[in-house]
Amino acid sequence: MKRREFIKLTALTALGVFLGSGALRSASAKITLEEALKKHLGVGLSQIKESDKVKIKAPSIAESGANVPIQVSADVPVEQVESLHIFVDKNPNPFIASVDFSPMNGEVFFATRIKMGATSPVRAILKLKDGTYLMASKEVKVTVGGCG
Amino acid sequence: MASIGRAIVRVPKKVKKGEVFKVQMVIIHPMETGLRKDPKTGKKIPAHYITHVDFYFNDKLVTRINSSPGISKNPYFAIKMKAQESGTLKIVYEDNKGNKWEKSVNITVEG
Protein backbone atom coordinates (compact mmCIF):
# COMPACT_ATOMS: atom_id res chain seq x y z
CA MET A 1 0.00 0.00 0.00
CA LYS A 2 2.75 2.39 0.97
CA ARG A 3 4.72 1.59 -2.10
CA ARG A 4 1.73 2.24 -4.30
CA GLU A 5 1.12 5.60 -2.70
CA PHE A 6 4.75 6.48 -3.19
CA ILE A 7 4.58 5.66 -6.88
CA LYS A 8 1.39 7.66 -7.25
CA LEU A 9 2.93 10.63 -5.50
CA THR A 10 6.09 10.65 -7.59
CA ALA A 11 4.07 10.27 -10.75
CA LEU A 12 1.88 13.22 -9.78
CA THR A 13 4.87 15.36 -8.84
CA ALA A 14 6.56 14.61 -12.14
CA LEU A 15 3.36 15.49 -13.99
CA GLY A 16 3.06 18.72 -11.98
CA VAL A 17 6.61 19.77 -12.81
CA PHE A 18 6.06 18.92 -16.45
CA LEU A 19 2.80 20.88 -16.70
CA GLY A 20 4.20 23.72 -14.63
CA SER A 21 7.18 24.28 -16.88
CA GLY A 22 4.96 24.09 -19.94
CA ALA A 23 2.57 26.68 -18.54
CA LEU A 24 5.41 29.01 -17.63
CA ARG A 25 6.92 28.84 -21.04
CA SER A 26 3.65 29.38 -22.85
CA ALA A 27 2.82 32.35 -20.62
CA SER A 28 6.07 34.07 -21.54
CA ALA A 29 5.97 33.98 -25.32
CA LYS A 30 2.87 32.26 -26.66
CA ILE A 31 1.04 33.67 -29.63
CA THR A 32 -2.44 32.32 -30.38
CA LEU A 33 -3.46 31.00 -33.79
CA GLU A 34 -5.89 33.89 -34.21
CA GLU A 35 -3.11 36.44 -33.53
CA ALA A 36 -0.77 34.69 -35.96
CA LEU A 37 -3.46 34.59 -38.69
CA LYS A 38 -4.20 38.31 -38.21
CA LYS A 39 -0.49 39.15 -38.36
CA HIS A 40 0.37 37.10 -41.45
CA LEU A 41 -2.89 37.12 -43.42
CA GLY A 42 -4.83 40.04 -41.97
CA VAL A 43 -7.92 37.88 -41.47
CA GLY A 44 -9.28 35.62 -38.73
CA LEU A 45 -10.14 31.93 -38.88
CA SER A 46 -13.86 32.68 -39.47
CA GLN A 47 -13.01 34.34 -42.81
CA ILE A 48 -11.14 31.28 -44.10
CA LYS A 49 -13.17 28.45 -45.59
CA GLU A 50 -12.27 24.78 -45.52
CA SER A 51 -11.88 23.28 -48.96
CA ASP A 52 -11.13 19.79 -50.24
CA LYS A 53 -9.27 21.42 -53.14
CA VAL A 54 -6.34 21.86 -50.77
CA LYS A 55 -4.58 18.63 -49.80
CA ILE A 56 -2.29 18.27 -46.82
CA LYS A 57 -0.30 15.11 -46.15
CA ALA A 58 1.13 14.57 -42.69
CA PRO A 59 1.49 11.59 -40.35
CA SER A 60 -1.45 10.93 -37.95
CA ILE A 61 1.06 10.16 -35.21
CA ALA A 62 4.50 11.75 -35.22
CA GLU A 63 7.31 9.87 -33.52
CA SER A 64 9.13 13.11 -32.77
CA GLY A 65 7.75 16.63 -32.74
CA ALA A 66 11.17 17.87 -33.83
CA ASN A 67 10.74 16.51 -37.31
CA VAL A 68 7.25 16.14 -38.81
CA PRO A 69 7.11 15.79 -42.61
CA ILE A 70 4.29 17.66 -44.33
CA GLN A 71 3.31 18.01 -47.98
CA VAL A 72 0.76 20.39 -49.47
CA SER A 73 -0.76 20.41 -52.95
CA ALA A 74 -3.92 21.88 -54.43
CA ASP A 75 -6.42 21.36 -57.25
CA VAL A 76 -6.24 25.06 -58.09
CA PRO A 77 -4.26 26.45 -61.06
CA VAL A 78 -1.11 28.09 -59.70
CA GLU A 79 -1.94 31.17 -61.82
CA GLN A 80 -4.87 31.87 -59.46
CA VAL A 81 -2.79 31.46 -56.31
CA GLU A 82 -0.80 34.13 -54.53
CA SER A 83 0.65 32.26 -51.58
CA LEU A 84 0.47 29.31 -49.21
CA HIS A 85 0.71 29.61 -45.42
CA ILE A 86 1.39 26.86 -42.89
CA PHE A 87 0.29 27.12 -39.25
CA VAL A 88 0.40 24.80 -36.22
CA ASP A 89 -2.28 25.86 -33.67
CA LYS A 90 -0.51 24.79 -30.49
CA ASN A 91 3.07 25.90 -31.24
CA PRO A 92 4.51 28.81 -29.17
CA ASN A 93 4.43 30.67 -32.48
CA PRO A 94 1.84 29.05 -34.79
CA PHE A 95 3.37 30.51 -37.99
CA ILE A 96 5.62 27.97 -39.70
CA ALA A 97 6.21 29.14 -43.25
CA SER A 98 4.69 30.75 -46.31
CA VAL A 99 5.39 30.29 -50.00
CA ASP A 100 4.87 32.91 -52.72
CA PHE A 101 4.04 31.27 -56.04
CA SER A 102 4.43 32.35 -59.65
CA PRO A 103 3.12 30.80 -62.91
CA MET A 104 6.62 29.30 -63.34
CA ASN A 105 5.82 26.88 -60.50
CA GLY A 106 3.50 24.96 -62.83
CA GLU A 107 1.43 23.72 -59.90
CA VAL A 108 0.79 24.34 -56.22
CA PHE A 109 3.20 22.15 -54.25
CA PHE A 110 5.28 22.52 -51.10
CA ALA A 111 6.92 19.99 -48.80
CA THR A 112 9.03 20.49 -45.69
CA ARG A 113 9.66 19.18 -42.18
CA ILE A 114 8.27 21.10 -39.23
CA LYS A 115 8.55 21.28 -35.42
CA MET A 116 5.51 20.59 -33.25
CA GLY A 117 5.37 21.26 -29.52
CA ALA A 118 2.23 19.21 -28.88
CA THR A 119 -0.65 17.38 -30.56
CA SER A 120 -2.31 19.95 -32.81
CA PRO A 121 -3.97 20.60 -36.14
CA VAL A 122 -1.57 21.55 -38.94
CA ARG A 123 -3.19 24.05 -41.30
CA ALA A 124 -2.41 24.83 -44.93
CA ILE A 125 -4.07 28.06 -46.08
CA LEU A 126 -4.05 29.11 -49.71
CA LYS A 127 -4.39 32.81 -50.48
CA LEU A 128 -5.96 33.27 -53.91
CA LYS A 129 -5.45 36.30 -56.15
CA ASP A 130 -9.15 37.16 -55.85
CA GLY A 131 -8.60 37.76 -52.13
CA THR A 132 -10.26 34.58 -50.83
CA TYR A 133 -8.71 31.88 -48.68
CA LEU A 134 -8.94 28.09 -48.87
CA MET A 135 -7.83 25.82 -46.04
CA ALA A 136 -7.08 22.19 -45.30
CA SER A 137 -6.07 20.90 -41.90
CA LYS A 138 -4.80 17.66 -40.44
CA GLU A 139 -4.54 16.65 -36.79
CA VAL A 140 -1.09 15.30 -35.90
CA LYS A 141 -0.60 13.47 -32.59
CA VAL A 142 2.76 14.24 -31.02
CA THR A 143 4.16 12.03 -28.27
CA VAL A 144 7.45 13.90 -27.73
CA GLY A 145 7.35 17.64 -28.42
CA GLY A 146 10.06 19.31 -30.44
CA CYS A 147 9.85 23.01 -29.79
CA GLY A 148 12.15 23.01 -26.71
CA MET B 1 28.76 23.63 -37.25
CA ALA B 2 31.52 24.57 -39.57
CA SER B 3 29.45 23.61 -42.56
CA ILE B 4 26.47 25.80 -41.59
CA GLY B 5 24.78 27.20 -44.69
CA ARG B 6 25.90 24.36 -46.93
CA ALA B 7 23.09 23.05 -49.10
CA ILE B 8 22.34 19.96 -51.11
CA VAL B 9 19.98 20.46 -54.06
CA ARG B 10 18.34 17.68 -56.04
CA VAL B 11 16.75 18.21 -59.47
CA PRO B 12 16.16 15.87 -62.42
CA LYS B 13 19.14 15.67 -64.81
CA LYS B 14 16.94 16.36 -67.82
CA VAL B 15 13.38 17.61 -68.14
CA LYS B 16 10.97 18.08 -71.02
CA LYS B 17 9.98 21.57 -72.10
CA GLY B 18 7.13 22.81 -69.91
CA GLU B 19 7.13 19.65 -67.77
CA VAL B 20 6.52 20.20 -64.05
CA PHE B 21 9.40 18.82 -61.97
CA LYS B 22 10.37 18.75 -58.31
CA VAL B 23 13.23 20.69 -56.72
CA GLN B 24 14.36 19.39 -53.32
CA MET B 25 16.93 20.89 -51.01
CA VAL B 26 18.43 20.47 -47.55
CA ILE B 27 20.32 23.29 -45.85
CA ILE B 28 22.72 22.60 -42.96
CA HIS B 29 21.44 24.98 -40.27
CA PRO B 30 20.67 24.72 -36.50
CA MET B 31 17.24 26.48 -36.73
CA GLU B 32 17.35 27.59 -33.08
CA THR B 33 14.00 28.91 -31.82
CA GLY B 34 15.41 31.16 -29.10
CA LEU B 35 13.29 29.27 -26.54
CA ARG B 36 15.76 26.46 -25.91
CA LYS B 37 18.21 26.54 -23.01
CA ASP B 38 21.77 25.29 -23.09
CA PRO B 39 21.69 22.24 -20.76
CA LYS B 40 25.21 23.06 -19.45
CA THR B 41 24.94 26.79 -18.71
CA GLY B 42 21.16 27.14 -18.30
CA LYS B 43 21.28 30.21 -20.57
CA LYS B 44 18.91 30.66 -23.48
CA ILE B 45 20.38 29.85 -26.88
CA PRO B 46 19.73 32.87 -29.15
CA ALA B 47 17.36 32.40 -32.08
CA HIS B 48 19.21 31.43 -35.26
CA TYR B 49 17.15 30.35 -38.24
CA ILE B 50 16.68 30.63 -42.00
CA THR B 51 14.36 33.56 -42.78
CA HIS B 52 13.81 33.00 -46.48
CA VAL B 53 14.77 30.99 -49.52
CA ASP B 54 14.41 32.39 -53.05
CA PHE B 55 14.45 30.26 -56.19
CA TYR B 56 15.50 32.04 -59.41
CA PHE B 57 15.48 30.43 -62.83
CA ASN B 58 17.57 32.37 -65.37
CA ASP B 59 17.39 35.33 -62.94
CA LYS B 60 13.57 35.32 -62.76
CA LEU B 61 12.02 34.72 -59.35
CA VAL B 62 10.06 31.47 -59.34
CA THR B 63 9.22 31.13 -55.65
CA ARG B 64 10.02 32.66 -52.29
CA ILE B 65 9.76 30.60 -49.11
CA ASN B 66 9.38 32.63 -45.92
CA SER B 67 10.75 30.39 -43.19
CA SER B 68 10.65 30.51 -39.37
CA PRO B 69 12.08 28.64 -36.36
CA GLY B 70 9.07 26.31 -36.75
CA ILE B 71 10.95 24.56 -39.56
CA SER B 72 13.04 21.59 -38.39
CA LYS B 73 16.81 21.63 -37.93
CA ASN B 74 18.68 21.19 -41.23
CA PRO B 75 15.62 22.37 -43.19
CA TYR B 76 14.22 20.34 -46.05
CA PHE B 77 12.21 22.20 -48.69
CA ALA B 78 10.61 20.92 -51.87
CA ILE B 79 8.80 22.93 -54.53
CA LYS B 80 7.73 22.29 -58.12
CA MET B 81 8.51 24.31 -61.22
CA LYS B 82 8.67 24.13 -64.99
CA ALA B 83 11.13 25.47 -67.55
CA GLN B 84 10.77 26.43 -71.20
CA GLU B 85 14.52 26.38 -71.93
CA SER B 86 17.73 25.13 -70.32
CA GLY B 87 19.26 27.36 -67.72
CA THR B 88 20.47 27.90 -64.19
CA LEU B 89 18.41 27.51 -61.06
CA LYS B 90 19.93 29.80 -58.45
CA ILE B 91 18.78 29.40 -54.86
CA VAL B 92 19.54 32.29 -52.51
CA TYR B 93 18.93 31.86 -48.77
CA GLU B 94 19.46 34.00 -45.69
CA ASP B 95 19.29 33.67 -41.92
CA ASN B 96 18.31 36.09 -39.14
CA LYS B 97 21.97 36.84 -38.36
CA GLY B 98 22.52 38.36 -41.81
CA ASN B 99 24.29 35.39 -43.35
CA LYS B 100 23.52 34.93 -47.03
CA TRP B 101 24.38 32.00 -49.24
CA GLU B 102 23.59 30.83 -52.75
CA LYS B 103 23.69 27.59 -54.65
CA SER B 104 23.22 27.07 -58.38
CA VAL B 105 22.38 24.00 -60.41
CA ASN B 106 21.93 23.59 -64.15
CA ILE B 107 18.72 22.34 -65.65
CA THR B 108 18.74 20.83 -69.12
CA VAL B 109 15.52 21.05 -71.10
CA GLU B 110 15.14 18.75 -74.07
CA GLY B 111 12.45 18.49 -76.72
Image (spheres, coloured by chain):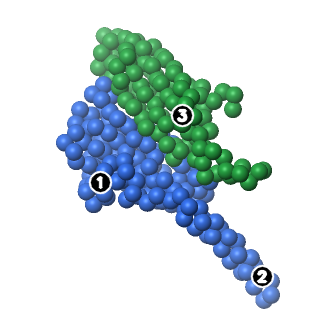
Chain colours: A blue, B green
* Secondary structure state at the residue bearing disc 1: loop
How far from the left and from the top, in percent, is residue A124?
37, 48
Under mark 2, the amino acid is Phe
Circle 3 residues within 10 Å: few <14, some 14–19, many ≥20: some
Label 2 in the same subunit as label 1: yes
How far from the left and from the top, in percent, is residue A50?
28, 55
How far from the left and from the top, in percent, is residue B111?
31, 10
* Secondary structure state at the residue bearing disc 3: strand
Residue extending furthest bottom? A1
Q: Residue at x 47, y 39 (%)?
A: B67
* Label 3 close to label 1 by CB (< 8 Å): no
| Residue A80 visible, this orientation | yes
Circle 2 residues within 10 Å: few <14, some 14–19, many ≥20: few
Under mark 3, the amino acid is Asp
Residue that carries the numbered disc 3 in the rendered image = B95
Mark nearer the viewer, 2 or 3: 3
